[in-house]
Image (cartoon, rainbow, N blue to C red):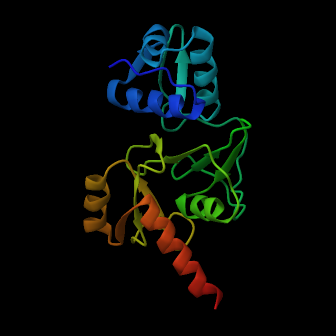
């Protein structure tokens, strides 16, 4: 499972997260080999993921961070100013190595559609607490479970998990692009 050399940091980081979700832990050497990059490049990528509290580095390796890792500083949603929690966070990474935090996919998608340019977007899976590529995730919109914003949007790693959740708690299961379109249309109606 050796990947071709990946030059874009965000693509490497997404790939590292995907491998960790499948395997649980990886060594630095294994990541160097799979990504086709240097030791220092792997460490820079892991440092960035560690800052986001999605991985935990150990001597010679890395694992996914425990779900309830306390964050050193309080994060505030760039859209609604609510506190960003580990349960539903949405992170927009930009090329200049900065990030924009949103309290949930609802606010994150609004930020993306209004003004934010993104190189990579991560969302917290509602069931398992893992960070996933937001563009590849599925969302349940307007379920009976409302954590913060309305309409509620919860992120799921797979279509099957989103549909199972939907059967139990209502709402609509959607891809990222359909969820953005739904949210945009809903907010147009709210403004009239």
- Would you say 190 lies left or right of 144 here? right
Frontmost residue, 80 versus 147:
80
Frontmost residue, 62 versus 73:
62
User: How far across and how far down the image is residue 30, in percent?
Assistant: 42, 11
- Would you say 36 lies left or right of 156 here? right
- The residue at the point 73 percent across, 40 percent down is 98
User: How far across and how far down the image is residue 191, in percent?
Assistant: 65, 86
User: How far across and how far down the image is residue 159, in percent?
Assistant: 30, 55
- The residue at the point 64 percent across, 92 percent down is 192
Q: In this view, does 29 lie above or below 49?
A: above
- The residue at the point 57 percent across, 25 percent down is 7
- The residue at the point 45 percent across, 62 percent down is 177
User: How far across and how far down the image is residue 71, in percent?
Assistant: 65, 37
Q: Is residue 10 above or below residue 77?
A: above
Q: Where on the picture, by quarter, is residue 144?
A: bottom left
**Total numbered labels:** 0
Q: Quadrant of the N terminus?
A: top left
């Amino acid at each position: 499972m050796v990947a071709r050399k990946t030059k874009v940091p965000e693509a490497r980081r997404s790939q590292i997260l995907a491998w960790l979700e499948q395997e649980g832990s990886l060594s630095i050497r294994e990541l160097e080999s799979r990504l086709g990059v240097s030791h220092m490049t792997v460490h820079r990528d892991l440092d960035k993921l560690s800052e986001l509290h999605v991985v935990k580095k150990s001597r010679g390796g890395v694992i996914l961070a425990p779900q309830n890792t306390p964050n050193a500083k309080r994060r505030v949603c760039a859209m609604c100013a609510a506190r960003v929690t580990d349960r539903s966070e949405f992170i927009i990474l930009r090329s200049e190595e900065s990030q924009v935090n949103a309290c949930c996919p609802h606010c994150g998608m609004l930020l993306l559609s209004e003004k934010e340019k993104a190189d990579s977007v991560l969302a917290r899976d509602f069931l398992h607490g893992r960070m996933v590529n937001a563009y590849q995730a599925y969302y349940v919109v307007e379920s009976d479970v409302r954590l913060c914003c309305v309409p509620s949007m919860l992120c799921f790693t797979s279509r099957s998990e989103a549909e199972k959740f939907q059967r139990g708690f209502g709402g609509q299961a959607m891809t990222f692009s359909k969820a953005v379109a739904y949210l945009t249309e809903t907010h147009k109606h709210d403004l009239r």
